[in-house]
Amino acid sequence: MTPARLALFAAITASAVLAAASLPAEDEAADNASPIYGVTVPEGYRQWPVIAPAHETDPLNELRVVVGNPTTVKAYRDGALPFPDGTVLVKLAWKHVQSPEFAPAYIPGAATTVQVMVKDSKRYAATGGWGFGRFVEGKPVDQAQHETCWACHQANVKDHDYVFTRFAP
Amino acid sequence: MTPARLALFAAITASAVLAAASLPAEDEAADNASPIYGVTVPEGYRQWPVIAPAHETDPLNELRVVVGNPTTVKAYRDGALPFPDGTVLVKLAWKHVQSPEFAPAYIPGAATTVQVMVKDSKRYAATGGWGFGRFVEGKPVDQAQHETCWACHQANVKDHDYVFTRFAP
């Protein structure tokens, strides 16, 4: 094989390897996207700043924290409504359990869901500009659960661009 | 006045102005430091990642979120105990109020306190390596309140380097 043919062969082989390697990643991405909306859990969200905590009583019985990406934090600080495209809110949730060390306090137990709202006014024009995703252990829950998101946000918080959470000062 | 004398005069005047201007800043820094420990509210903490939320029931009736600086986040992720010098934990607290938009949810009301723990094993050797600060509207509360911090942490969470909060996964 001449050096030129060897290089061509190497390039083709590398392409084939890359193509093969990319298939599982694509399948995985599809598996990890929410039904209806195609929303995924954003990378790095666990490092994002706090928008606000919440406590959800029965039947869910959860402690929650909503965090936001830089676009979201800026929008809250500026009081910008509607939220701009690129806004991403992530709500982390855990069971609300009594502290074994200090009885008046309730602390996070097992993680329950991670819930995501993504603003894209064109892609999600039919749902107020918002795409929704609800995830358990990194995997999206079923379509029936995702059908409940928009109806509840639309009914309750239209005046806050369909977002429940306010910035906690 | 010769140019050289003019420059000297200008330099002396500028120094005097700077010295006068620095006095209020120093007074302010002292005003903003906690009694006993000299702990201040760290800059930029509102952008730090979440360690965990909590719900404190009566009599305080608060929602809380503990955030940490990069040293702290790394220590939690690594499971490092004791926490290294440079660890800074900040607890934000608000009144626990029912959501007007979704009855099962409780959300942050008025901000109450910001509480800070700083690890410096030499400076705070007498209190397990920890300095404490409790602040209301940016100002430290009185010495009597600061005298309660160490006793409670020492009594309840000695096995977790005197820190109540665990990382919420």
Image (cartoon, coloured by chain):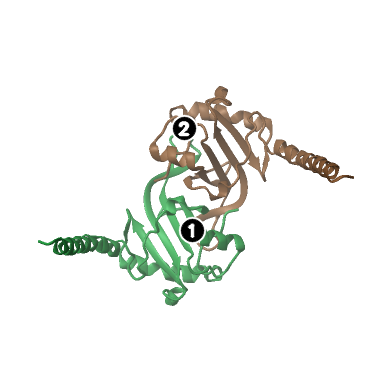
Chain colours: A brown, B green
What residue type is disc 1 on?
Answer: Asn
What residue is shown at x 74% (from left), y 41% (from top)? Answer: A25
Examine the rendered structure and indicate whether residue A12 appears above or below residue A161.
below
Give amino acid for label 2.
Answer: Phe
Given the image, what chain letter belongs to the residue carrying mark 2?
A: A
Depicted A21 relative to depicted B61: above or below: above
Task: Decide if residue B75 is on the left or right side of residue B130.
Answer: right
At which x and y percent is residue B30?
Answer: 28, 65
Circle 1 residue = B69
Q: Where B89 falls versus A28 (above or below)? A: below
Residue A150 at x, y = what percent?
A: 56, 28
Which numbered dot is residue B145? none
Number of marks present in the image shown? 2
> What is the residue that sits farthest to the top in this orientation?
A126
List the residue tagged with mark 2: A83
Q: Classify mark 1: residues with Cα within 10 Å, few (<14), some (14-19) or many (20+).
A: many
- At mark 1, the secondary structure is loop
